[in-house]
Image (tube, helix red, strand yellow):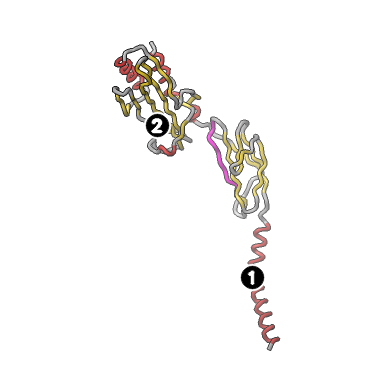
């Protein structure tokens, strides 16, 4: 009887082995043909290279993409659009031995300038009477902004509507806020608000905008004009 059961177990084992052998062979073969891949990444001079979120630096660097894994590479440079790529190492994707990541110029950057007047209060002193100063402020502002969203002469507060400019890689919104700093002597505070968000978004999506330390050239002379004309 014992030999009978042993015979049955042996036959079942052989049956399972024959049935599962191709599966194990296929799995072993599949894993065997995917190996760690080295890729030489080249970028423009001055660009920063991030590999899986870590700054590597340099204009050329080698990365290793482990078998059945993904390596993320992000390249940044001031004045250029950030480029990001994922290198997937499996049996479905072909990876290059080297890759030159070319960056496109950032048109928002090209149409703006670095400004210490962005997002900060600038004092504007004047010897004019309050009524005359307020009228002059209105004239200067409407040369650059079509819509004044809020104006309150009694409190000395004025705020323009957002002016939105869409670029290839960004949306820039700009507004001007005027408020009275003091009445004697008469001093106004002008704040040119400049913010940048992802391309194609609405100006009302506040959560997607962040302060930008640059100002579009369209508004380059707004604050200087206020200073020169009110200061006369």
Instruction: Note whether 208 is above or below 16 in the view shown.
Output: above
**Start-end of magenta stretch:** 79-87
Would residue 102 be found to the left or right of residue 193 on screen? right
CB under 8 Å between callouts 2 and 1? no
Q: Return the residue nearer the eye: 124 or 30.
A: 124
Question: Could you say where residue 205 lies in the image, as x and y percent from the top left?
Answer: 40, 38
Residue placed under numbered mark 2 in the picture: 164
Within-10-Å neighbours for mark 1: few <14, some 14–19, many 20+: few
Res 217 → quadrant: top left
The answer to which of 119 and 172 lies nearer the viewer is: 119
First reached walking from the N terminus: tag 2 or tag 1: 1
Closer mark to the observer between disc 2 and disc 1 = 2
Q: Quadrant of the N terminus?
A: bottom right
Which residue in the structure is indicated by mark 1? 20
State left or right for residue 152 relative to residue 69. left
Does 119 lie within the magenta span?
no
Residue under the point 53% across and 31% down: 105
Residue sticking out furthest to the top: 232
Q: Is residue 30 left or right of residue 140?
A: right
**In this view, 134 is above or below 63:** above
- Identified at 56% across, 41% down, the residue is 84
Q: Where is residue 121, by image quadrant?
A: top left
Secondary structure beneath dot 2 equals strand
């Amino acid at each position: 009887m014992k030999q009978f059961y042993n015979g049955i177990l042996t036959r079942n084992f052989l049956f399972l082995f024959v049935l599962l052998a191709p599966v194990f062979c296929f799995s072993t073969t599949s894993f065997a043909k995917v190996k760690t891949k080295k890729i030489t990444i080249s970028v423009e001079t001055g660009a920063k290279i991030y590999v899986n979120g870590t700054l590597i630096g340099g204009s050329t660097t080698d990365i290793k993409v482990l078998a059945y894994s993904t390596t993320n590479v992000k390249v940044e440079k001031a004045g250029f659009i950030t480029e990001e790529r994922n290198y997937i190492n499996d049996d479905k994707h072909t990876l290059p031995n080297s890759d030159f990541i070319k960056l496109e110029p950032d048109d928002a950057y090209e149409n703006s300038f670095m400004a210490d007047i962005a997002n900060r209060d600038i004092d504007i002193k004047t010897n004019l009477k309050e009524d005359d100063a307020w009228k002059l402020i209105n004239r200067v502002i409407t040369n650059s902004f079509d819509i004044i969203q809020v104006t309150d002469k009694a409190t000395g507060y004025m705020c323009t509507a957002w002016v939105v400019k869409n670029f290839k890689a960004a949306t820039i919104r700009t507004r001007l806020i005027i408020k009275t700093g003091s009445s004697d002597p008469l001093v106004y505070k002008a704040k040119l608000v400049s913010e940048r968000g992802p391309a194609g978004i609405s100006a009302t999506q506040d959560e997607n905008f962040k302060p930008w330390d640059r100002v579009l050239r369209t508004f380059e002379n707004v604050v200087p004009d206020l200073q020169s004309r009110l200061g006369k």
